[in-house]
Image (cartoon, grey):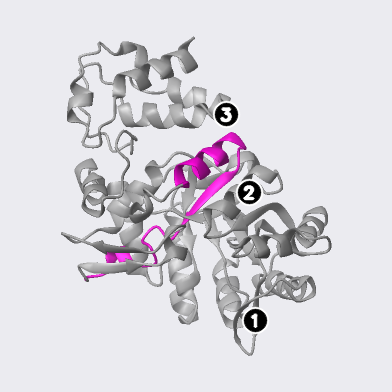
């Protein structure tokens, strides 16, 4: 397992976490087995999206004796009505459900408390209004019931506004290969880096659409973070390819694939044992026409480099550091097998790049930023 810093929270979270949405409705034995397998494999970030009693009871049983090994999240505004999930902006109802969540999980706190599923501008204003969910989350933080405040949403404009407001520590947003070229997505990721907001990538499989056997799939707007897309797949897509794309994106701290059984958990964690060639996602971007010519997607098709430069990682660190150069980014650059200054400007990387990236000027920028 690889661990990454969750923005300014300082938490070191597993790069692959566990989304628990699809554990809802499973037996207690199934929930316990999936959670324990995840923890034993190094997963330490669990996203708990519902306030449903049976769901929480099963997760509470799974976490018994393991609470201090994981970082837990909850979603303020994810409530229950007539036994079903219900989204609300009522502070009173949200408070009641959150306190019930803590009791059923057998814990006194969560590590990240998300303002749940905030999308439209009107919705955002309801969340931040005086006496609303944001104020409630702040009170829970003061009381020690939540360590950090996050926001989950599916709209680039609203998510960017929240990140730039300085009021949230973590953003949870859909990131997957089919939405690579959604307008504004790259700016949002760069805003997270600039404000040191931890970035949690949800829906890495686009709600399962990317893994379906259908050759033509429709990915809804809430799953892309932008407009709905009709996509044609020329070949099957693997969970590893999807996760490889997500984890390559600048600023992503962790991703939370939803796993309803041990087989799906194993398929996600197989990423760490999969050879590089099987992680390759570049053909998917071309297949979906989901790229902007000249933008690096960190796929490293430009390699091999005669100077052994890891071009994809170098450019990834550069794009994050241009927003906010931290000691962590500088240390990551220093740990690379070769520096940008080792480039002999042979031009082979630019010739090989399938996305039209002019690599050498980017390496020169990396030299100025990291080595001057």
Residue 358 sits in quarter = top left
Reading the image, the residue beneath label 1 is 80
Marks 1/2: CA–CA distance: 28 Å
Disc number placed over residue 324 in the picture, else none: 3
Give the residues drawn in magenta, as a range: 184-213
Q: Is residue 134 left or right of residue 16?
A: right
At x 65% / y 81%, what residue is drawn? 80
In the image, residue 218 sits, relative to residue 364, either above or below, namely below
Q: CA distance from mark 3 to mark 1?
A: 40 Å
Q: How many marks overall?
A: 3
- Earlier along the polypeptide chain: callout 2 or callout 3? 2
Image position, residue 175 (x, y; %) = 43, 53
| Residue 241 in picture, x, y percent from top left | 28, 52
Which one is in front, 158 or 270?
A: 158
Element type where label 3 sits in the image: loop
Q: Which residue is mark 2?
A: 161
Distance CA(mark 2)–CA(mark 3): 18 Å
Residue 130 image-quadrant placement: bottom right
Name above or below for residue 368 compared with residue 146: above
Residue closest to the eye, 36 or 266: 266
Residue 80 appears in the figure:
yes
In primary-sequence order, the first of circles 1 and 2 is 1
Q: Residues within 10 Å of mark 3 (few under 14, many from 20)?
A: some
98 magenta-colored: no
> In the picture, residue 356 is in which quadrant?
top left
Question: Counting other residues with Cα less than 10 Å from the Cα at mark 2, is it few (<14), some (14-19), or many (20 or more)?
Answer: some
Asked whether the residues under the numbered discs 3 and 1 touch, taking CB atoms below 8 Å apart as contact, a structural biologist would say no
């Amino acid at each position: 397992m690889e661990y990454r810093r969750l923005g300014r929270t300082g938490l070191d979270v597993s790069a692959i976490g566990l989304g628990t949405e699809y554990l809802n409705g499973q037996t207690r034995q199934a929930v316990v087995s999936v959670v324990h397998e995840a923890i034993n494999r190094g997963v330490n970030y669990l996203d708990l999206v519902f306030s449903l009693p049976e769901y929480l009871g099963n997760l509470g049983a799974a976490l018994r004796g393991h609470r201090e090994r994981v970082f837990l999240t909850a979603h303020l505004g994810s409530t229950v009505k007539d036994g079903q999930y219900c989204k609300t902006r009522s502070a009173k109802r949200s408070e009641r459900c959150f306190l019930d969540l803590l009791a059923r999980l057998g814990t006194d706190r969560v590590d990240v408390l998300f303002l749940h599923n905030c999308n439209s501008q009107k919705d955002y204003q309801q969340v931040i209004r005086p006496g609303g969910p944001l104020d409630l989350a702040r009170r829970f933080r003061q009381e020690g019931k939540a360590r950090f405040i996050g926001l989950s949403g599916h709209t680039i404009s609203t998510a960017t506004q929240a990140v730039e407001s300085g009021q949230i520590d973590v953003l949870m947003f859909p990131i997957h290969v089919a939405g690579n070229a959604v307008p504004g997505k790259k700016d949002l990721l760069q805003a997270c880096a600039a404000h040191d907001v931890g970035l949690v990538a949800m829906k890495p499989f686009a709600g399962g659409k990317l893994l379906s056997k259908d050759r033509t799939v429709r990915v809804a707007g809430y799953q892309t973070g932008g407009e709905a897309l009709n996509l044609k797949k020329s070949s099957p897509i693997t969970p590893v390819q999807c996760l490889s794309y997500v984890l390559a994106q600048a600023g992503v701290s962790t991703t939370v694939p939803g796993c309803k059984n041990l087989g799906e958990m194993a398929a996600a964690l197989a990423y760490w044992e999969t050879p590089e060639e099987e992680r390759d996602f570049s053909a998917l971007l071309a297949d979906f026409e989901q790229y902007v010519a000249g933008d690096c997607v960190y796929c490293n098709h430009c390699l091999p480099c005669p100077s052994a430069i890891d071009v994809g990682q170098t450019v990834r660190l550069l794009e994050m550091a241009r927003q906010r150069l931290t000691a962590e980014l500088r240390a990551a650059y220093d740990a690379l097998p070769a520096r940008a200054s080792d480039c002999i400007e042979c031009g082979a990387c630019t010739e090989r790049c399938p996305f039209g990236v002019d690599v050498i000027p980017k390496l020169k920028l990396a030299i100025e930023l990291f080595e001057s």
